[in-house]
Amino acid sequence: MNRQEKQAAVREAINKVPLISSAAARLLELSGESEHGIVDIVNIVKYDAVLTSQILKVVNSAAFARRTEVYSIDHAVSLLGEDMVVGIAMSEAAALLFDKKLEGYAAEAGSLWRHDLKTAIAAKIIAGYARTKVNGDLAFTCGLLHDLGKGVLSDFLRNTPEKIRRAMEEKKVPDYAAAERAILGIDHAEAGYELSLNWNLPAPLPQAIRFHHQPALIDEALKPLLYTIHLADIVAMMSGVGTGSDDLQYTLDTAYEMYIPLSGNELAMVMLGVEQEFSKAAAVFLGKEEEASE
Amino acid sequence: MGKTVVVGVGEFAVSNDPGEVIKTFALGSCVAVIFLHKPTRTVGLIHVALPESSISPDIVRDRPGYFVDTGIPAILKKMAACATPGANLTQGMMVKIAGGANVLDTNNTFNIGKRNVLALKKILWPLGMGPVAEDVGGSISRTVSVSVETGKIALSSPTKGVWEL
Ligand SMILES: [Fe+2]
Ligand SMILES: [Fe+2]
């Protein structure tokens, strides 16, 4: 297959990804609205029986260590909080992509989910440091979705990781996304963007996915959000949670300083906070037996 | 094969059980410091994340191993407790380090990997424990495992396979 044929095959694969449930789509949309609360979330969740039972299962799991069973969805949602509910909804809705083994990136099953979850948590924390206000819930959602395109691209990148590593070492390509483009005519950010359009996700989610490695290219108004996602992705990789062969193979756009003035100590605080939040979330999502506090 | 002891971020492990392997995954900008004390056949590994504890004194209590400045004294204390009583750890101690990676074109603020390595050397040198081998920096996330029996250290990454430190 030449590059054009490969690109067409990738597009076909994107179009074949199942749509997400309307509850999941509505929850993603809600995170971008400035005025919303737990009640709005409950009102979305309660009409989706599968999601409701999933949420009740999580809240009653060992990770939460509750003495009494939680039966009401209102109570469950308020115990979990918005981020966790959005996380549960997406982990179900896009499980096919999140949970697959990323052969094209030499990464184990579940790597994409862990990386996206860690980026989401980092994005929410970094949002607090932005010069102009960035909606933390929206930043979380963007983080959760930012690399979904890898779930599609992976199948077309089998047997490429070693080749790409050599090209990177010889500085033939500036970053891993450029290598993806050189091979397939499309990179994971663009693939995720097209997927999010198929899913009818509202602005700015598709744009955030598309430009997370090139935040300088987005409209000025969206730059604070985009640099937040850009840095969160890098923080996740620095903390050792990447997706295999492309781990750390991206550049830092230092223009972030104009939007998110982080000092060295503040970055260290961010990294600590991310580690703590992630181990709590991991206990819930990944079923790891860790003490969860309430 | 023997038991594998997995060390997480900010954790450390010490062993003189020849059946054990100490392992830590995907270091990113974190650094693994491996202490090999041949005279007492004691091995230690710590996975430090940040150079200085002064940013968050309350974390130090739960997890001194998070930071270079509190982690190194903590693991050395544990090694002394594990080794033969009265053994002089500064005699015959060999130290190796790995990790401290970064993304491409990073800046000073985001070069935590480099700051970790510098902070480590600053604390190890005066103890007479300057690293005799290092595999640090670059844009590669390393996984490290040490055999307590042989003291051999294997590094690995998803695309580079396995190599020895
Ligand atoms: Fe990405
Ligand atoms: Fe990413």
Image: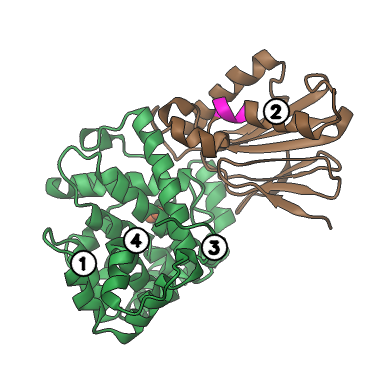
**What span is colored magenta in the figure?**
B68-72
Do discs 3 and 2 share a chain? no
| Chain identifier matching the brown colour in the rendered picture | B
* Residue A290 visible in rendering: yes
Q: Is residue B119 above or below residue A90?
A: above
Q: Name the residue beneath numbered marker 1.
A: A38
Are the residues flagged by discs 1 and 3 in contact, CB closer than 8 Å?
no
User: In the rendered image, which residue does mark 2 sit on?
Assistant: B76
Q: Quadrant of ligand 2?
A: bottom left
> Quick one: label 3 or label 4, which is nearer the N terminus?
4
Please give the chain letter of the residue carrying mark 4. A
For the stretch drawn in magenta, the main secondary structure is: helix
Q: CA distance from mark 3 to mark 2?
A: 30 Å
Amino acid bearing label 4: Leu
On screen, residue A131 versus residue B64, left or right, reads left
User: Can you give x and y, in whole percent of width and height, for residue A20 in the image?
Assistant: 30, 78
Q: Which residue is mark 4?
A: A144
Residue A81 x %, y %: 29, 63
Q: Which chain is green?
A: A
Q: Nearer the viewer, mark 4 or mark 1?
A: 1
The residue wearing badge 3 is A288
